[in-house]
């Protein structure tokens, strides 16, 4: 998420009431999670396991709960609860805006686009040219849709990330301030749900086709010309490279990468990253030919046991 202007380190520290290490006028241009952070951004870290990763990341400012040595060229925000203070910043820079019309006045809709009845389009949404948005589609604030996109009935774009911190008093939600971005010539089926990024973008690239009842988690990237069949569930922070095919009821774990032109057969469970150009099956996913051989051998076990009894 980029800020509307450059903020100084001192200004940000005052917003969250924290101490800081670095020059008062050190410029800050945005905030992001560790996997998408860029130079000029704030990243937060609240667990010793990830201190080094955050401090060595591209982030210019690290919001951290320990007094550590500041890396050269960076700044620190010292907080007793970085998770809480990251939420404070999201609320400040991307506050919730309630709606009083079905299509917000700030929405931009391109020439030739058809909006069917009962569609909700939120604040600051951008929709390109020659799109068709079917009835009962909900498009949350700040989503961006390209040209020649079709979205079928009941689909929701921009719902919150499923991201919580387990505290003694209950589950504490990490507030979502990101977007869903859909590029040109994408088709999205009925009753799909695509969560927005926490601070970055959930991205569906040019030419991809999604069937009905698909769930895509926060900050996930779907590459170009992918085909995803019904009831696929993809967790957050997944990268699906170009021209991947996923058949029905595939499940993909968080932060996995699926390589270009991989084929994932129906009811496969993807528990780790997979190389491109291969076909996979089973749970956990293995190359389909190997998995099918294993299944054939398993069927022979009763026969083998019977032979062993006769020895």
Image (tube, rainbow, N blue to C red):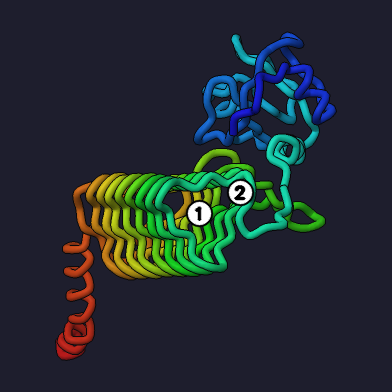
Which numbered dot is residue 141? 2
Expressed as whole percent of the image width and height from the top left, the position of residue 25 reads 73, 10
* Horizontal side of residue 59 vs 190, given as left or right: right
Element class at badge 2: loop
* Residue shown at 43% from the left, 53% from the top: 113
* Dot placed on the residue nearer the N-terminal end, 2 or 1: 2
Would residue 104 be visible to someone looking at this image?
yes
Q: Nearer the viewer, residue 156 or 85?
A: 156
Residue 189's x, y, as percent? 39, 65
Q: Secondary structure at mark 1?
A: loop
Q: Is residue 127 above or below residue 170?
A: above
Q: Which residue is mark 1?
A: 217
Label 1: few (<14), some (14–19) or many (≥20) C-alpha neighbours in 10 Å:
many
* Comparing labels 2 and 1, the label whose residue is closer to the camera: 2
- CA neighbours of label 2 inside 10 A, class few (<14), some (14 to 19), many (20+): many
Left/right placement of residue 293 relative to residue 235 reads left
Q: CA distance from mark 2 to mark 1?
A: 17 Å
Decide: is 153 above or below 241: below
Identity of the residue drawn at 18% across and 84% down = 308
């Amino acid at each position: 998420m980029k800020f509307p202007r450059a903020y100084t380190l001192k200004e940000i520290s005052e917003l969250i009431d924290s101490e800081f290490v670095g020059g008062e006028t050190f410029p800050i241009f945005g905030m992001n999670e560790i996997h998408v952070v860029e130079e000029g951004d704030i990243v937060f870290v609240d667990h010793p396991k990830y201190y080094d990763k955050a401090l060595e990341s591209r982030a210019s400012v690290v919001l951290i709960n320990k007094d550590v040595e500041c890396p050269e060229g960076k700044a620190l925000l010292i907080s007793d609860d970085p998770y809480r203070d990251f939420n404070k910043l999201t609320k400040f820079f991307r506050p919730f805006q309630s709606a009083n019309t079905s299509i917000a006045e700030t929405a931009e809709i391109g020439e030739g686009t058809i909006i069917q009845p009962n569609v909700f389009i939120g604040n600051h949404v951008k929709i390109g040219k020659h799109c068709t948005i079917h009835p009962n589609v909900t498009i949350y604030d700040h989503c961006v849709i390209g040209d020649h996109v079709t979205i079928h009935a009941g689909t929701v774009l921009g719902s919150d990330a499923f991201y919580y911190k387990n505290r003694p008093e209950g589950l504490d939600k990490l507030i979502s301030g990101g977007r869903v971005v859909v590029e040109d010539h994408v088709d999205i089926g009925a009753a799909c749900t695509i969560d927005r990024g926490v601070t970055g973008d959930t991205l569906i690239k040019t030419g991809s086709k999604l069937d009905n009842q698909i769930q895509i988690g926060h900050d996930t990237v779907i590459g170009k010309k992918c085909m995803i069949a019904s009831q696929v569930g993809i967790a957050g922070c997944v990268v699906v490279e170009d021209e991947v095919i996923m058949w029905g009821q595939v499940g993909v774990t968080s932060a996995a990468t699926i390589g270009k032109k991989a084929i994932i057969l129906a009811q496969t469970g993807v528990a780790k990253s997979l190389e491109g150009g291969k076909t996979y099956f089973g749970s956990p996913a293995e190359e389909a030919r190997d998995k099918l051989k294993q299944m054939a051998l398993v069927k022979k076990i009763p026969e083998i046991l019977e032979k062993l009894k006769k020895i």
